[in-house]
Amino acid sequence: MIARAPDKGTEGNRGKRGAFVALMGFGVFLSFFSVALHPSSPAGAAVVQAPPFTTRIESVRVDVLVLDGGRPILGLKPSDFEVLDNGVAQQVELVSFENIPLNVVLALDMSDSVAGERLEQLQDAGRAVLGGLTRGDQAAVVNFSHAVTLAAPLTADIASVRDALDEAWGIGNTSLADGVYAAMMVGEADAGRALVIVFSDGLDTSSWLGDDRVLDAAKRSDAVAYAVSVGATGNSSFLRDLASLTGGTAYKLDSTRDLRATFLRILDEFRHRYLVSYTPHGVARDGWHRLEVRVNNRHATVKARPGYLAGT
Amino acid sequence: MRPLLASVVIVAAIGAAASAQRPAARSGVRTTLATRDIIVTQQRLDRFTEWIKAVHDHEPGESDAALERVASWSGDELRGLWADAQFLAALMRSLKLNHFEIPQARETIAILYKPALLQRMRAMACAAAGHLLSADCRAIHAADSLDEELRAFAADAAADRTRSGEDNYFLRRAAILHADVEMIASAVLDVPASASSRPLPGPRRVKADTSDGISVKVHEVGVHWEIARTLLSMVVPKGLERPAPARDAMVHDWYRATAAWMQHAESHDTDHVNRARELFPSDPDILFLSGTLHEIYASSEIQAAAHSVAMPSGFELDIGSVRGELHQAEGFFRRALAQAPEMAEAHLRLGRVLALQGHDVEAIAELQQALTRLGDEELEYDGELFIGAAYESLGRYDEAAAAYEDAASRVPSAQSPLIALSQLARRRGDRGGALAAMARLFALPMPDDGDRRDPWWFYNTAQARNADDLLEGLRAPFRRRAQ
């Protein structure tokens, strides 16, 4: 409705980016090397660019919870696990249980609706999780309203994380998808086991990222996301899908009074998970890898991510 | 930039009432439908007289006593006013009318005035038309039955009639008053009246307040917009003998300004835009605002709210599926561009809704057209984000990254292009790049220090950023000091 003459061109710096240098992990510990240049596609052509690097999968790691009658089964060894990657049996190389420190990222909805008692109960639940961390564990806080902020970076200085939690207050809209994505990235910034605990009491109203883009990132990540929601958020499929894709659980609460117990339950469950790793063989590199994790010779319930995504 | 709102309002009208908005004054010949009579009381006419004085006293754009008085009236009081105002407008053109009919689905409601009250209505019609000294009005001694305030009103109307050559002074001022009630006083219907088992005939509307995409309150509210629209439907432009609001510049400006205000305030009313388009089907601004309304209706926030809201019986929210709303938005943007091909913002919006429908190649062409014409930094930012997303969907990742970087350079404190860059890098397997983009995001100023802004957060209201200017242009000629 307001029209002014353009004062600058917009095409000048288009199409000049064609190279990426990559040396990185890939959620499930994929690594990539090499540099490539490639021209832009002609305007309007629906051509998917090949990734500007080659990839080599080093290892895949999967957090696995093994339950018998709702209680964790302890003491399992690599030989107890059977892992199928796209239906192909893999050689399980390592099973760790207690020795890998946790990176706990609290992704907290700090929109308008989180105020008063609800805010206090959320802060109390967060403090309870921080209180349950042990030596070597790290924690971070990502707050999201319309803005996404790193209130506390990933650190073993838990007191500073607690301070950040205490200073939080709610204002504005809800960028749930953006906040979840940011939290996953914080969790991935370090080699530890990433547990993302998402809390929200509202529907997404201001994210740039669509749910599908965040779920795509979740498929590429080895972070395990647990989602805790109250109110209408629990009716959204996004948090359920997020938890399902990462091997976590989505909790829908009637009241934030139950937040503390739920957060502690999540931490306890995550501590009892095995970290199973293997180097894929006999499967294509790119695309969706369907995972099946079983425990041999046991009547056990196994909970793990349903797969992972590799390639572009 | 306006403050960030955390809630939106969706307005729904009751189906039967919406169809009764057209004036239906008749001169005493009863229809063949069953007729129910409503006898106007002295109290009702006293309130109507108060209303005429409020129309006269209200200073456009101000929160004054006149506005507060009208804002306090209940739903039934407003419905009575809605009928009486139409009758008054009809009397302005023919003093011989003696009652007013409101057609309903199964019956006709006849609004009847006892002789003494009919005489008062006729006198007020003479005043409203600026005709107090005409032969017909002198014949009924109209001036003798008016108090000082109403005679002052009549004088202003007569002066306006002399100045403009038409008799729409009262209709225009009343429409501005009721729009101001909505925009300034946020009128709410009192509960006892809304709970009436048999409300007076006329329009009814409910508002669904939402927050975070959740319906938090559904309540019946005053029908001020309906009254204003009805009054303007009776405007007779200079040189014509019958109502022709579609040929009136002020009516056009009123619809454009109020429709923009609704989107600016996130108080959405489909009927309002539909009526605007009925009157001005080829107006590019009205078509553009029609498109943006349906684009907003396709948003996750409105869709979620629409699914969570429990509407009272008989009311319809009139919000379709995402697909349906996007399709409608696309159609309106195309119609706007057919009328005004240079309308850069319509290219921008069309590009976005095309991309949301998966037509990325066509979307890029529209967005490129927009980017060469917008000339507005924040809209160009939006355009770069949208074209980046379209490129990304097509797998043209380098161009997507370049567009996101362009957006980031236009608004360095915005988080959306950085999170888009991170996600894109992650998608390409570039975890280092993804983390680097997040590091840039986390280095942005904290939201509460005022230096952090992201035009994307305001995209759903950006199209109406000139609403205040439009309203000022509408109100200025009606201010006392301007007359």
Image: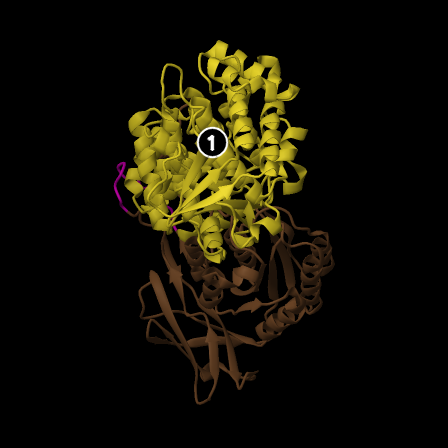
Instruction: Label 1, secondary structure: give it.
Output: helix
Chain rendered brown: A
Which chain did the renderer colour yellow? B
Against A300, residue B478 (above or below) is above
Q: On the image, which quarter does residue B340 sit in? A: top left
Q: Is residue B297 above or below residue A188?
A: above
In the image, the segment drawn in magenta is: A34-47
Residue B483 occupies quadrant? top right
Residue B197 position within the rendered picture, expressed as x and y whole percent measured from the top left: 53, 55
Relative horizontal placement of residue B354, taking residue B262 as reference (left or right): left
Q: From the top left corner, tell me how far across and down residue B426 is, in percent.
A: 44, 52
Relative to B323, does residue B50 appear above or below in the rendering? above
Chain of the residue on which disc 1 is drawn: B
Please state which of residues B261 and B322 is positioned toward the viewer in this rendering.
Answer: B261
- Give me the residue at 25% from left, 41% from top: A45
Q: Is residue B305 left or right of residue B325?
A: right
Q: Nearer the viewer, residue B326 or A63?
A: B326
Q: Is residue B140 left or right of residue B347?
A: right
Q: Amino acid at mark 1?
A: Phe
